[in-house]
Amino acid sequence: MGRMTRGLIALVAVLGIGYAGGPAAAVPARTDAQVPAAQAASNADEVGIQATARSVRCAGAARAAGWTGENLVISVAVSLAESQCVAGAQGYNGPTSGCPNGSLDRGAWQINNCYHSWVTDACAYEVYCNARAAHDIWGWSGWSAWATYTNGSYRNYLDEARDGVNNSGGGVYGTVNTGGDPLNVRSGPGTSYALVGTVAHGTTVRIICQARGTRVWSDVYQYWTDIWDKIGDGRFVSDGFVHTGSSGTVAPSC
Protein backbone atom coordinates (compact mmCIF):
# COMPACT_ATOMS: atom_id res chain seq x y z
CA MET A 1 0.00 0.00 0.00
CA GLY A 2 1.51 3.35 -1.00
CA ARG A 3 4.79 2.10 -2.47
CA MET A 4 7.56 4.47 -3.43
CA THR A 5 7.90 2.49 -6.65
CA ARG A 6 4.44 3.66 -7.61
CA GLY A 7 5.25 7.26 -6.73
CA LEU A 8 2.30 7.47 -4.33
CA ILE A 9 3.84 7.05 -0.89
CA ALA A 10 3.01 10.70 -0.30
CA LEU A 11 -0.66 9.83 -0.60
CA VAL A 12 -0.36 7.43 2.31
CA ALA A 13 1.48 10.05 4.32
CA VAL A 14 -1.38 12.47 3.77
CA LEU A 15 -3.68 9.99 5.51
CA GLY A 16 -1.73 10.77 8.67
CA ILE A 17 -1.70 7.30 10.18
CA GLY A 18 1.79 6.54 11.39
CA TYR A 19 4.30 6.13 14.15
CA ALA A 20 8.04 6.65 14.53
CA GLY A 21 9.47 3.20 14.01
CA GLY A 22 11.55 1.14 11.63
CA PRO A 23 10.58 -1.81 9.50
CA ALA A 24 9.40 -4.82 11.45
CA ALA A 25 11.08 -8.18 11.02
CA ALA A 26 9.15 -10.44 8.71
CA VAL A 27 7.34 -13.40 10.18
CA PRO A 28 8.82 -16.58 8.70
CA ALA A 29 6.64 -17.79 5.87
CA ARG A 30 7.02 -20.33 3.13
CA THR A 31 9.96 -19.45 0.94
CA ASP A 32 7.87 -19.67 -2.21
CA ALA A 33 5.42 -17.14 -0.74
CA GLN A 34 7.96 -14.43 0.01
CA VAL A 35 7.67 -12.47 -3.19
CA PRO A 36 8.59 -8.76 -3.25
CA ALA A 37 5.23 -7.04 -3.58
CA ALA A 38 6.33 -4.68 -6.33
CA GLN A 39 7.55 -7.65 -8.36
CA ALA A 40 4.40 -9.64 -7.65
CA ALA A 41 2.13 -6.81 -8.74
CA SER A 42 3.98 -6.45 -12.03
CA ASN A 43 2.92 -9.88 -13.28
CA ALA A 44 -0.46 -8.71 -14.54
CA ASP A 45 -0.60 -11.28 -17.33
CA GLU A 46 -0.36 -14.33 -15.05
CA VAL A 47 -3.44 -16.46 -15.67
CA GLY A 48 -4.64 -20.06 -15.46
CA ILE A 49 -4.98 -22.43 -12.50
CA GLN A 50 -2.71 -20.38 -10.24
CA ALA A 51 -4.64 -17.20 -11.04
CA THR A 52 -7.96 -18.91 -10.30
CA ALA A 53 -6.63 -20.36 -7.05
CA ARG A 54 -5.31 -17.02 -5.84
CA SER A 55 -8.52 -15.16 -6.70
CA VAL A 56 -10.64 -17.77 -4.93
CA ARG A 57 -8.31 -17.65 -1.91
CA CYS A 58 -8.53 -13.85 -1.73
CA ALA A 59 -12.29 -13.83 -2.28
CA GLY A 60 -12.84 -16.22 0.61
CA ALA A 61 -10.80 -14.05 2.97
CA ALA A 62 -12.36 -10.81 1.73
CA ARG A 63 -15.91 -12.15 2.10
CA ALA A 64 -15.14 -13.37 5.63
CA ALA A 65 -13.75 -9.92 6.48
CA GLY A 66 -17.08 -8.30 5.59
CA TRP A 67 -16.88 -6.98 2.04
CA THR A 68 -19.97 -7.53 -0.08
CA GLY A 69 -21.24 -6.75 -3.58
CA GLU A 70 -19.01 -4.78 -5.90
CA ASN A 71 -16.72 -3.80 -3.04
CA LEU A 72 -15.98 -7.50 -2.56
CA VAL A 73 -14.84 -7.72 -6.18
CA ILE A 74 -12.77 -4.54 -5.83
CA SER A 75 -11.15 -5.82 -2.64
CA VAL A 76 -9.95 -8.95 -4.43
CA ALA A 77 -8.74 -6.96 -7.43
CA VAL A 78 -6.81 -4.60 -5.15
CA SER A 79 -5.13 -7.51 -3.35
CA LEU A 80 -4.21 -9.17 -6.64
CA ALA A 81 -2.73 -5.89 -7.90
CA GLU A 82 -0.88 -5.28 -4.64
CA SER A 83 0.56 -8.74 -4.00
CA GLN A 84 -1.14 -11.43 -6.15
CA CYS A 85 -2.81 -12.34 -2.83
CA VAL A 86 0.48 -13.77 -1.55
CA ALA A 87 0.40 -14.01 2.25
CA GLY A 88 4.14 -13.44 2.69
CA ALA A 89 4.51 -10.59 0.18
CA GLN A 90 6.57 -7.57 1.23
CA GLY A 91 7.15 -4.16 -0.34
CA TYR A 92 9.82 -1.81 1.04
CA ASN A 93 9.22 1.95 1.19
CA GLY A 94 12.00 4.48 1.66
CA PRO A 95 11.93 7.19 4.34
CA THR A 96 8.91 9.52 4.42
CA SER A 97 7.91 12.36 6.71
CA GLY A 98 5.82 10.01 8.81
CA CYS A 99 8.23 7.06 8.70
CA PRO A 100 11.81 8.40 8.61
CA ASN A 101 13.32 4.91 8.87
CA GLY A 102 11.33 3.55 5.95
CA SER A 103 8.56 0.98 6.21
CA LEU A 104 7.24 -2.34 4.94
CA ASP A 105 3.97 -3.12 3.17
CA ARG A 106 2.92 -6.59 4.34
CA GLY A 107 0.82 -9.46 3.17
CA ALA A 108 -2.07 -9.88 0.78
CA TRP A 109 -3.44 -6.34 1.11
CA GLN A 110 0.00 -4.81 1.74
CA ILE A 111 -0.70 -3.24 5.12
CA ASN A 112 2.03 -0.79 6.08
CA ASN A 113 3.89 -1.53 9.31
CA CYS A 114 4.45 2.15 10.12
CA TYR A 115 1.18 3.87 9.23
CA HIS A 116 -0.76 0.85 10.49
CA SER A 117 1.53 -0.34 13.27
CA TRP A 118 -1.47 -1.67 15.21
CA VAL A 119 -1.54 -4.59 12.77
CA THR A 120 0.98 -7.12 14.07
CA ASP A 121 3.23 -9.12 11.75
CA ALA A 122 1.47 -12.29 12.87
CA CYS A 123 -1.78 -10.82 11.57
CA ALA A 124 -0.34 -9.11 8.50
CA TYR A 125 1.18 -12.32 7.13
CA GLU A 126 -1.98 -14.41 7.62
CA VAL A 127 -4.52 -13.96 4.81
CA TYR A 128 -7.74 -13.91 6.83
CA CYS A 129 -6.39 -11.59 9.54
CA ASN A 130 -4.82 -9.34 6.90
CA ALA A 131 -8.19 -9.11 5.17
CA ARG A 132 -9.95 -8.12 8.39
CA ALA A 133 -7.39 -5.39 9.07
CA ALA A 134 -7.67 -4.16 5.48
CA HIS A 135 -11.44 -4.03 5.83
CA ASP A 136 -11.04 -1.84 8.93
CA ILE A 137 -8.68 0.49 7.05
CA TRP A 138 -11.12 0.64 4.13
CA GLY A 139 -13.89 1.57 6.57
CA TRP A 140 -11.85 4.56 7.72
CA SER A 141 -10.17 5.70 4.52
CA GLY A 142 -11.98 4.06 1.63
CA TRP A 143 -10.11 2.64 -1.33
CA SER A 144 -7.84 5.70 -1.55
CA ALA A 145 -5.58 4.03 1.03
CA TRP A 146 -4.31 1.69 -1.73
CA ALA A 147 -2.06 3.01 -4.48
CA THR A 148 -3.20 0.31 -6.92
CA TYR A 149 -6.73 1.67 -6.61
CA THR A 150 -5.82 5.35 -6.97
CA ASN A 151 -3.58 4.68 -9.97
CA GLY A 152 -6.17 2.39 -11.56
CA SER A 153 -3.98 -0.71 -11.90
CA TYR A 154 -6.50 -2.79 -9.93
CA ARG A 155 -8.78 -2.67 -12.99
CA ASN A 156 -6.43 -5.11 -14.74
CA TYR A 157 -7.57 -7.74 -12.23
CA LEU A 158 -11.32 -7.10 -12.08
CA ASP A 159 -12.28 -9.99 -14.35
CA GLU A 160 -10.11 -12.42 -12.42
CA ALA A 161 -11.42 -11.04 -9.13
CA ARG A 162 -15.04 -11.42 -10.22
CA ASP A 163 -14.36 -15.01 -11.25
CA GLY A 164 -12.83 -15.69 -7.85
CA VAL A 165 -15.80 -14.17 -6.04
CA ASN A 166 -18.23 -16.21 -8.10
CA ASN A 167 -16.38 -19.43 -7.28
CA SER A 168 -15.33 -18.90 -3.67
CA GLY A 169 -18.34 -20.32 -1.88
CA GLY A 170 -16.91 -23.81 -1.46
CA GLY A 171 -13.56 -23.08 0.12
CA VAL A 172 -10.11 -22.03 -0.98
CA TYR A 173 -7.62 -24.01 -3.02
CA GLY A 174 -4.10 -25.30 -2.62
CA THR A 175 -1.67 -27.52 -4.49
CA VAL A 176 -0.24 -30.69 -3.00
CA ASN A 177 3.53 -30.37 -2.76
CA THR A 178 5.33 -33.38 -1.34
CA GLY A 179 8.32 -33.34 -3.65
CA GLY A 180 6.92 -36.29 -5.57
CA ASP A 181 5.34 -38.85 -3.23
CA PRO A 182 1.58 -39.22 -2.70
CA LEU A 183 0.18 -37.34 0.32
CA ASN A 184 -1.62 -39.39 2.96
CA VAL A 185 -5.28 -38.55 3.59
CA ARG A 186 -6.56 -39.16 7.14
CA SER A 187 -10.08 -39.44 8.53
CA GLY A 188 -9.34 -36.60 10.96
CA PRO A 189 -6.78 -33.86 11.69
CA GLY A 190 -3.91 -35.98 12.92
CA THR A 191 -1.60 -38.89 12.26
CA SER A 192 -3.51 -41.07 14.73
CA TYR A 193 -6.59 -41.02 12.51
CA ALA A 194 -7.19 -43.78 10.01
CA LEU A 195 -5.51 -43.61 6.61
CA VAL A 196 -8.33 -43.31 4.07
CA GLY A 197 -6.39 -42.67 0.86
CA THR A 198 -3.73 -40.58 -0.84
CA VAL A 199 -3.53 -37.52 -3.10
CA ALA A 200 -0.91 -37.27 -5.82
CA HIS A 201 1.81 -34.62 -5.79
CA GLY A 202 0.76 -31.61 -7.87
CA THR A 203 -2.98 -32.11 -7.36
CA THR A 204 -5.09 -28.99 -6.77
CA VAL A 205 -7.33 -29.57 -3.75
CA ARG A 206 -10.29 -27.62 -2.40
CA ILE A 207 -9.79 -26.69 1.26
CA ILE A 208 -13.21 -26.58 2.89
CA CYS A 209 -11.89 -25.57 6.30
CA GLN A 210 -8.84 -26.04 8.52
CA ALA A 211 -8.37 -27.62 11.95
CA ARG A 212 -5.57 -27.87 14.49
CA GLY A 213 -4.22 -31.34 15.13
CA THR A 214 -1.00 -33.36 15.24
CA ARG A 215 2.15 -31.32 14.65
CA VAL A 216 3.88 -32.51 11.49
CA TRP A 217 7.36 -31.67 10.17
CA SER A 218 7.29 -30.53 6.56
CA ASP A 219 10.56 -31.47 4.91
CA VAL A 220 9.37 -29.53 1.86
CA TYR A 221 8.95 -26.19 3.64
CA GLN A 222 11.25 -26.94 6.61
CA TYR A 223 8.95 -26.11 9.52
CA TRP A 224 6.49 -27.70 11.94
CA THR A 225 2.75 -27.16 11.51
CA ASP A 226 -0.34 -28.38 13.33
CA ILE A 227 -2.72 -27.15 10.62
CA TRP A 228 -4.75 -29.79 8.80
CA ASP A 229 -6.80 -29.11 5.67
CA LYS A 230 -10.23 -30.68 5.27
CA ILE A 231 -10.57 -31.61 1.59
CA GLY A 232 -13.76 -33.66 1.86
CA ASP A 233 -16.04 -35.45 4.32
CA GLY A 234 -13.74 -37.36 6.68
CA ARG A 235 -10.70 -36.43 4.55
CA PHE A 236 -7.84 -34.38 6.04
CA VAL A 237 -4.28 -33.72 4.87
CA SER A 238 -1.41 -31.95 6.60
CA ASP A 239 -1.13 -28.33 5.47
CA GLY A 240 2.64 -28.71 5.59
CA PHE A 241 2.43 -30.41 2.21
CA VAL A 242 -0.14 -28.15 0.55
CA HIS A 243 0.95 -24.92 -1.10
CA THR A 244 -1.57 -22.20 -0.20
CA GLY A 245 0.70 -19.16 -0.27
CA SER A 246 0.86 -19.06 3.53
CA SER A 247 2.27 -21.00 6.47
CA GLY A 248 -0.78 -19.93 8.49
CA THR A 249 -4.49 -20.56 8.10
CA VAL A 250 -6.13 -19.53 4.83
CA ALA A 251 -9.62 -21.00 5.35
CA PRO A 252 -12.25 -20.90 8.11
CA SER A 253 -11.88 -23.16 11.14
CA CYS A 254 -13.61 -26.54 11.01
Image (spheres, grey):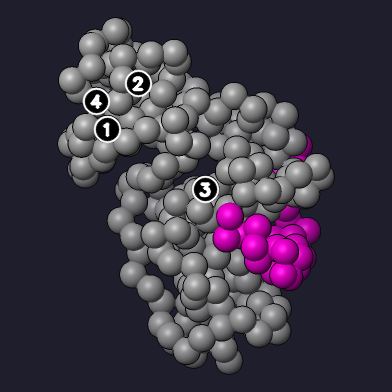
Q: Which mark is residue 139?
A: none
Q: Nearer the viewer, residue 178 or 136?
A: 136
Query: Closer to the observer: label 4 or label 3?
Result: 4
Q: Could you tell me residue 203's position as x and y percent?
A: 41, 18
Circles 4 and 2 in contact, beta carbons < 8 Å: yes
Badge 3 crowding class, 10 Å Cα cut-off, few under 14, some 14 to 19, many 20 or more, is: many
Q: Could you tell me residue 8's position as x and y percent?
A: 68, 75
Residue at mark 2: 236
Q: Is 134 part of what is drawn in magenta?
A: yes
| Majority SS type along the magenta span | helix
Q: Which residues are magenta?
A: 132-159
Residue 209: in sight, yes or no?
yes
Q: Residue furthest right?
A: 70
Above or below for 126 versus 181: below
Q: Could you tell me residue 15's position as x and y percent?
A: 69, 80
Circles 1 and 4 in contact, beta carbons < 8 Å: yes
Q: CA distance from mark 3 to mark 1?
A: 20 Å
Residue at mark 1: 213
Residue at mark 3: 128
Q: Could you tell me residue 213's position as x and y percent?
A: 27, 32
- Residue sitting at 56 percent across and 37 percent down? 57
Quarter of the figure with the N terminus: bottom right
Badge 4 crowding class, 10 Å Cα cut-off, few under 14, some 14 to 19, many 20 or more, is: many
